[in-house]
Image: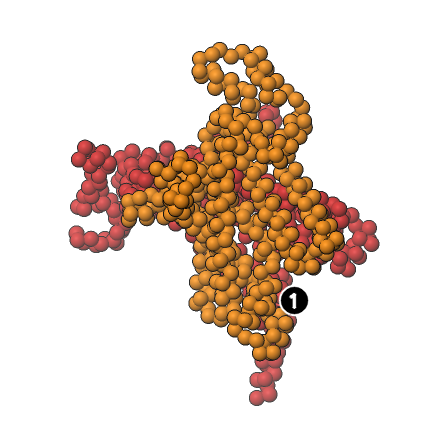
Amino acid sequence: MYKFAQFALVRATMAVFTMIVVSFIVFSLMELVPGDCAERYLAFKNTQGSAISIADIENERVRLGLDRPYMVRWGDWIVNAFRGEFGDSCILRVDISQLLGQKFWLSLGITLSALVLSYSIAIPVGIISATSNNPYLNNSLRLVSYLGLALPNFLLALMIMLFSTMVFGDTLTGLFSNEFRDAPWSFARAMDFLSRAWLPVVILGWSATAFAIQTVRALMSDEIGKLYVTAARARGVSGGRLLMRYPAKHALTPIINSLGFDLNRIFNELPIVALILTLTEAGSLLIEALARSNDQQLAGAIIFMLTASIVTINFLTDIALALTDPRIRRSIIG
Amino acid sequence: MAEVKNIYKVQDQKLKEAYFTAGQGQLIWARFKKQKSAMAGAFVLILLIMSGIFAPFITPYEPTIAGRNETYLNGAPQIPKFCDENGCSLRPFIYSFERTRSLATNFRWETEINRDKRRYVQFFVQGSEYKYFNFNVNLPGKALDFRVPGLTFNIHLFGVNEGQIHIFGTDATGKDIFSRTLFAINTSLAVGTIGVLIAFVLALAIGGMSGYYGGWIDSFLQMLTDAVRTIPAIPLFMAIAAFIPDTWSAELRFFFISIMLGFIGWPTLARRVRTHLLTERNQEYVLAAQLCGASAGHVIRKHLLPSFTSYIIVDLIITFPYMVLSETALSFIGLGLKDPVNSLGVMLQSVTNADVMLNYQWYFIPVIVFIILVLAFVFVGDGLRDAADPYGDASK
């Protein structure tokens, strides 16, 4: 138990360290954007008809605390970020945590569902492809998983939209239909959400599945030639029982370990798919923040939250692995 | 009988000798040749790269606004034919056409093909000028400027005797999609090359230090690598790309995007370099070199790196499609390259339009070229990875 606590502590420290490095990168990027919040705010006021002087900008800087040194502001930002407060958006003038709130959790939910979907397909298919000797099956699976890379999600989304416009006359875009967009959560709204959310989940899951099949297949075919499998077979264990009890158990451990990075890969695609399917509730807010309005506060907050959820998942999977496998506890502490 | 056996033995011996004395490159090539899919991928890839490099010669028109055809906006592809109901001709031909647009056609251009008037395809025709080996470098300070005039040509592979030919059709401004596609391959490959090279240098430096020294340097660098790896790359790209001022020229934008791709793409490569180095650095030949007083840099460069050059090349080829994909995704959402530069992403951008999807399906031709390009890279990369694996033969 002591060993385990030590492991968890080391892991937690590493996660926090990663978040600090990430926050530094994100914050520096935010700072690099030409112009700061004060200028942008006053530029907005200028369009409303009030005259702006240099002194006004300076006053606004002092009010927003932008006159303090770089490191102090970074420290301030990161402390607030860990508390879940990101201040006000530069352009929209709304509290960011309020602006993101539900949208972020919806995006995370979609991404996680895509991850679950991809592995629930990839694990059985990968195991079958590693164990079967059928060249046609293997080659066609290989082609599909290559296509997963070559036909990126945004192209797939486009194709599906093209198809659905031509066949159904409906573009299948958005996460809610119009009558439910601003309604409070209810059973009907949840059903409406589910009837539309499957499309982004499937599209995001597409390349993730292709990738996961390759991983499962590679891990499985490494494991299946090992002596303990032969030994088990010699003892008379066979078929699915043999696969599940012996090689699959070992082959699948590294996958749990890489779940965080898989989630990262899916998150990657989310903003672009969201843009095509016009999911205003999800990642397209990020594109909006960056491309249209140059809203650095909002963009920084989104990237920070994305990374935080990935780091959290990495941490959780490590802990879960360590609970089940004592070798991992030892390997980290050294 | 015994003689025949002997001959076989000698031949066998020779084969074995050839096998054991062959260089790493020859071994990889021998194994690579056996894989049909990888060979097919390599063939397609070389074809695409060559058509990218010789794009100015192969394409009939300039891909920019200068080469546009005002009389054929949003025009359908014109496929050259040899035969029709008016008889056959050895020289392929296309038809001339009349275009009208009115309220009746919903203000969309309607093309009426005149089947009686042929336009014959000609080869090696004179057209717009293009240059090879032409460099113009303008650095601050007069002394640093240099110009190489290069070679100027004006011969194009094909054209027609009157009007213009667009085998992939034209876009909304009348630019030839075939020309744009080939130039786009060029751009995408260039972005990929610059990105991969920068990622490679960073990966070698960081992964090399991390793997060679080990200990706390390794732990620190690994944490740094992991931190960079955890940030989702495309949102990060987007954040950086959004900082590019609108005033930048297309070329500057192009270089910035490629450099950026390199700066974000290094962690995976760095991890691989580190793993290779960690396994190699405890070998005796490294110890021997160290005892002779070789410096760390010397040992890494002269002894360690050559031991896994082939792996690094394979890794580079595997990374390549990811770079091309990232660039495409970026340009697609409008944060990457912009119009005067032709990249595959820029061309994909115009496909999102509903009007295009329903009426001008030939806009999708670059999409197919893009998929083929990435698939070819993946097949070659996969084949090379199998071929470079020294344990691959042990099981056979």
Other residues around mark 1 within 10 Å, as few (<14) / some (14–19) / many (≥20): few
User: According to the colouring, which chain is orange?
Assistant: A
Residue in front for this viewpoint, B148 or B292 = B292
What residue is at 40 percent from the left and 44 percent from the top? A187
What residue is at 54 percent from the left and 71 percent from the top? A241
Image coordinates for residue B177, horizontal then vertical, percent: 35, 42
Residue extending furthest front? A186
Q: Is residue B371 left or right of residue B73?
A: right
- Quadrant location, the C terminus of chain B: bottom right
Residue in front for this viewpoint, B100 or A126 = A126
Chain of the residue displaying label 1: B
What residue is at 57 percent from the left and 49 percent from the top? A261
Q: Is residue B131 left or right of residue B123?
A: right
Vertical position of residue A15 compared to residue A118: above or below: above
Under mark 1, the amino acid is: Thr
- Quadrant location, the N terminus of chain B: bottom right
Residue in front for this viewpoint, B374 or A325 = A325
Tell me the quarter of the picture where residue A250 sits: bottom right
Residue in front for this viewpoint, A121 or B152 = A121
Residue marked by disc 1: B21
Image coordinates for residue B10, horizontal then vertical, percent: 62, 78
